[in-house]
Amino acid sequence: MVLRLLIARGIVETPGFAHFVAVMIIAQIVNETTQTVTQTGIGLGSAIAVVCSWQRNRSILWAILAGIFSWFYVIYFAATRRPEESK
């Protein structure tokens, strides 16, 4: 669609250049999407903390709270682990 628009407006005359422009636009969109996903995703510490908290408490509220504390909760969990949790 972008390629047709560029050809219709006379900006692009050769298919080689049009293909290059289209590829560059798609690459930019993919790059921006990848950056957004990685910047808004949860971290490894949060994921581990949520799993540990759920395993111990079986509570969504505590799991969310543990996810907020991230690595601090993971260290706390490792320090206060019960014998039945260390299988």
Image: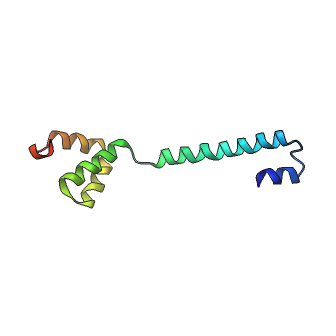
Residue 58: which quarter of the image?
bottom left
Q: Is residue 24 left or right of residue 4?
A: left
Residue placed at 29% from the left, 41% from the top? Answer: 71
Applied colour scheme: rainbow
Residue 27 in the image: x percent, y percent?
66, 42
In the rendered image, the quadrant that contains the C terminus is top left
Q: Is residue 36 left or right of residue 24?
A: left
Residue 29 in the image: x percent, y percent?
64, 47
Residue 82: which quarter of the image?
top left
Q: Is residue 58 left or right of residue 47?
A: left
In the rendered image, the quadrant that contains the N terminus is bottom right
Residue 11 in the image: x percent, y percent?
87, 46
Residue placed at 23% from the left, 51% from the top? Answer: 53
Residue placed at 23% from the left, 60% from the top? Answer: 59
Residue placed at 71% from the left, 41% from the top? Answer: 24
Closest to the observer, 68 or 23: 23
43 in relation to 2, above or below: above
Numbered-mark total: 0
Closest to the observer, 66 or 54: 54
Closest to the observer, 87 or 66: 87
Residue 32 in the image: x percent, y percent?
60, 45
Residue furthest toward the bottom?
Answer: 60
